[in-house]
Image (cartoon, coloured by chain):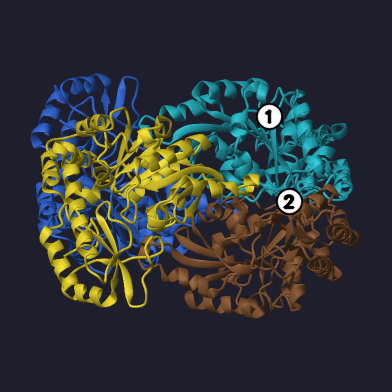
Chain colours: A brown, B cyan, C yellow, D blue
């Protein structure tokens, strides 16, 4: 019963198989190979337009590299104060951008709004004493498992465009949000004004690859240099590309995301039906945030359930009272339905 | 007949198999898994002492991260002017170190000497107007396929120690050098005074993993932070560790390196016997640098041989004359003996 | 009637005279001159112990350079969210530290507490995914004109020491705070555990010089390199040192600070006696923060008064209501008593 | 007899007087004052076109800040290997540019040529593994006291333009070169294709101010942010501007430069007439580089002459033999003719 994260699971067998099959003969190193060429074309098809794609090894690298292309070192980047780029990357955005100012915004349910960004910027009245507003980063699905609607994303796109800001989407769980909204990749990204996307793959079944996807070609121009000098250009890049080829084949990615979301929903519904438990945010993707009695949490862990306590700050529900704790439960492509049932049984007992 | 690089080949089947086998159940993410624990212990055994090990995705990351732990941003790092850290990483060392000064030294046969470093430092007579000498980086085997002897490495160790400098070894081809010298990993590293090692794995049969190995524990203290904020901590780290586990099993790494070196030697001997060809440096590991007539090079390429022209600057032989060119031929664990024979046949025809 | 800032005034005539007198003959450049030597000794006397002193051109440089010596690039620095290092330096701390995480804390009256820092650090439970807590920066007097008591500073010193953090004091208005507390420079700094001090001079009568003062000699070791490569080592450094020599002579600095504080107190008392005005924070140094009716503010400006509106966030009084605004009034060594009287007359009319 | 550098002298009395006069009343801080406005207009007049001007405290800051606007962090900057930006700034260019690659070129007489840059770039054949060529920096007059002709500068301008590179001129001794060539400031800068200029003032009589001058307005757009976050925006900026106002008044700057050059020429001629001495480079501005017998050097120093030994590498004369040493002698606006005479007497005795 491991609900600690979607990255505690291994690799989808179909993806692993593709890697084994890619291991044939020689290939031009450093992304000059045929599989990389094919996957670039595939991304164009997935997003229904020409995009620029660069594969990297981690989501932190994808996020920080994109931000480094979006902001000068004296710029400001706006994001939710609980966003991965703010809290989980040990200063990678500051490192990669050469010291840009990361400005956290408080927003309930894990979401921020253009108005929050506008409000911050309205305080920048002292010329170069303030940093130059440069980019907004939103996470889809969010760190609290909520999902921005297309309207919400489009509002960011319009706002960013009108202010000369770039819009980044951290899509570590892009697939989970996509199937939640039931829209197309194009709709959830560039059609709403997203300039660049961290397209997550690892959490949804890959071994270790994330795709940097640019819709704003101007940002992509020199990106190869950035990836290289960050040590993120793999010599045997074909094995990253092979993971993505399997990921897209037969809509494996959507299938995996749907499964994870379905199990999360079942978990949320089951927990919602238990009197002593309340959901901290509505479950919209593959994570459930719930406030539970400490005794229930202890009992679950004793019986083998694995999951993390979570910071209650960004939730929109009543915060944990004495004797309560907020926890995070994440499901994945490989979570078993039995684990969900068993978890609910123990919780409800 | 691909002699372009050792990274144009795929993954050793035994390493690939280990990755498939590692794909079982859940594992603590971000290097908290059991295979990572085991491989750390294994490194202690390989190096006959306690070492600190951190896995990363690329050699550029390994090198630049180690240098960032060795030099302050106002420091100077000395290396051969043709070293990978000088020429092939698009400024990664400058990026990771926060702007340290990379100082290239000219040395024949791809090698530098402590005297060259001492000479440079002797010009640093103006206090803080010069950078602070901080580290030396040597490559084993070198970019020209030569191998530092244990005496040569120990001379660097003694020199660095006496000057308060740190000594880094870029061991992208550590195994090839090791079997060339026929010594132990301990002898070729910390026993000679090496403080930290980029332990190469990818070029010798892995899919994509390099190990940062610290012999100076003080340098390792905060290294986890550096790896994290460089986007080099993989969530599913077990698959990096699994590659290394197979790499060490049954001395696979030494077997692969011996095979590559043997084929390179055959290539070198064959070419040396051709009148119109001269070796640019003695072949000591798995690369051959040869000056050939342009017509021979053209003919080889037309007949399917793949290899790169190379910068002649660091060689110790007579530079290419009009109508000649210097080329690099690299062999690997997966190079076929037939390819070597065929190459020599065409060249000698 | 200029209350915009203490830096709108020029140079104290006694300091200007010292610069003219320093303009004799030749002197070793780059801080190798005699006046620099003398001023270093003078700092030892002022602080009653050996200190390391480095002169720089601006307060932003002093702050950012000190922080760069206190935190690794993957570290975290804690400061009031309205501190100069957070809000007014366009990312200089991020730049100089190589991307350290600047973490703002909300505190009323412009002050923070060790408990606020402890609370933030208690959320750092994920190892290298969080930055490494490295330093605390407090401002004395604060951006709201309040003054930390010796007990409050000592509490920071004790806390920082117990947690392995470094303690920085931004003393852009060190003199104003010092005379407010009526203690010695030693008491207000290293005796309370301050490790390094940005010793402000410019706002209190100099032309352009700030002193970086280290009480922790370990931090000072390589600081000369940092100053140099930041372009903050002036070739004709004697003219910076000369300003400080005059600053300390006959306690000019204390006299100037006392005068500025006295006028601020008069301003605060006068405003406090006006019914429609309320002080946002008690006036303890040389700045007055007051909430005024907009009509009064307009009238003052029409009659020639110059001053800035201010962000109300950090004040401890009731925030401005509709039709009110918070303003900042700063006095200096050169503010005239007549200006204060006239300002109060117009405000009270 | 101080020939150590032109910065061992103090401030021209007319410049000092202007600073004293600027000390009247209040002025908007941070470069918002009237004198700063006037000096900006004055620069337009001096350069016969609209330019963007930013004052900073040191030449190192001017150089490094300009380069940071010219190159991305993954770019390469080409300069003479003995240039100030390469050798004398402790890595400031690497720091300010976020880690750009500084590539030194060897050239006799302190000069480089476009062909040398072209030759280096021709080796950049591996895409993003090499840095992206971004800028060229030339020094006028050079570190060896030689002066680029207008034709030589124009050749750089044409080359840079054709390759998409930016051209920086380090004009720490701009005035000395200008009067040597007898041309206009416009001719020696933008008319030859210079994009940005470090306009030196301090060495030619100021207390401490250098002007960053942009001819390429695109580079200047965000420069205010860069200056601010480098801690190079002085609050009492009027005192920097006042120095420049006096510098330009009545052509003081040209008068000072002419005097320095005249004395250097006298020194060079006098030394050239001594059999045991040979000039290392022709004296074209205000510095003399000479190879002298060690005994002569010792004698001069014993008799009170102050000057530095120098690295012989970049000279175009026969290098020092056993018992010889190369020295640098710099004259300034305040060097006395008597000192020159006396120096020559002792040397020739």
Q: Position of residue B34 (x, y in %)?
A: 81, 40
Name the residue tied to disc 1: B147
Q: Earlier in the sequence, mark 2 or mark 1?
A: 1
Q: Nearer the viewer, residue D330 or A108?
A: A108
Q: Position of residue D327 (x, y in %)?
A: 27, 30
Q: Position of residue D209 (x, y in %)?
A: 24, 51
The residue at 49%/57% (across/down) is: A100
- As measured in the structure, the alpha-carbon distance from the residue carrying label 2 to the one carrying label 1 is 36 Å
Could you tell whether D142 is left or right of D240 in the image?
right
Q: Is residue A151 visible to the viewer in this orientation of the structure?
A: yes
Quadrant placement of the N terminus of chain D: top left
Mark 2 vs mark 1: give the one in front: 2
Could you tell whether D103 is left or right of D148 in the image?
right
In the image, residue B172 sits, relative to residue A107, either above or below, namely: above
Q: Nearer the viewer, residue B145 or B83?
A: B83
Q: Judge if badges 2 and 1 mark residues of a common chain.
A: yes
Q: Is residue D81 visible to the viewer in this orientation of the structure?
A: no
The residue at 12%/26% (across/down) is: D345
Question: Can you tell which mark lies on residue D247?
Answer: none
The residue at 9%/47% (across/down) is: D13
Name the residue tied to disc 2: B235
In the image, residue D42 sits, relative to residue C247, either above or below, namely: below
Circle 2: element type: loop
Q: Position of residue A138 (x, y in %)?
A: 61, 67
Quadrant placement of the C terminus of chain D: top left
Quadrant for residue A312, please give it.
bottom right
Q: Chain of mark 2?
A: B
Circle 1: element type: loop
For label 1, the crowd category at 10 Å Cα-Cα, with few meaning under 14, some 14 to 19 and many 20 or more, is: many
């Amino acid at each position: 019963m491991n609900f600690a994260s979607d990255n505690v699971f291994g690799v989808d067998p179909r993806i692993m198989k593709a890697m084994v099959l890619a291991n044939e003969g020689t290939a031009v190193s450093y992304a000059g190979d045929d599989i990389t060429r094919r996957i670039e074309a595939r991304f164009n098809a997935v997003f229904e337009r020409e995009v620029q794609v660069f594969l990297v090894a981690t989501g932190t690298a994808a996020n920080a590299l994109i931000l480094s292309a979006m902001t000068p070192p004296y710029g400001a980047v706006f994001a939710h104060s609980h966003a991965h780029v703010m809290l989980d990357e040990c200063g990678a955005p500051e490192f990669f951008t050469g010291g840009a100012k990361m400005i956290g915004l408080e927003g309930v349910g894990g979401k921020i709004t253009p108005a929050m960004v506008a409000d911050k910027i309205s305080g920048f009245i002292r010329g170069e004493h303030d940093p130059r507003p440069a980019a907004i980063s939103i996470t889809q699905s969010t760190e609290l498992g909520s999902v921005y609607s297309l309207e919400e994303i489009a509002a960011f796109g319009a706002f960013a465009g009108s202010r000369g800001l770039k819009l980044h989407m951290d899509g570590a769980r892009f697939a989970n949000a996509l199937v939640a909204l039931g829209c197309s990749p194009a709709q959830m990204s560039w059609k709403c004004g997203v300039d660049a996307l961290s397209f997550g793959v690892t959490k949804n079944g890959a071994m270790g690859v994330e795709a940097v996807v640019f819709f704003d070609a101007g940002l992509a121009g020199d990106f190869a240099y950035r990836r290289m000098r960050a040590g993120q250009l793999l010599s045997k890049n074909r094995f990253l590309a092979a993971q993505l080829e399997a990921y897209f084949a037969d809509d494996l990615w959507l299938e995996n995301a749907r499964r994870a979301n379905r199990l999360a929903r079942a978990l949320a519904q089951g927990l919602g039906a238990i009197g002593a438990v309340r959901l901290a945010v509505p479950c919209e993707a593959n994570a459930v945030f719930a406030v539970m009695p400490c005794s229930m949490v202890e009992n679950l862990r004793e019986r083998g359930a694995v999951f993390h306590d979570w910071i209650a700050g960004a939730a929109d529900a009543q915060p944990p009272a004495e004797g309560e704790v907020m926890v995070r439960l994440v499901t994945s492509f490989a979570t078993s339905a039995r684990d969900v049932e068993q978890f609910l049984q123990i919780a409800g007992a």
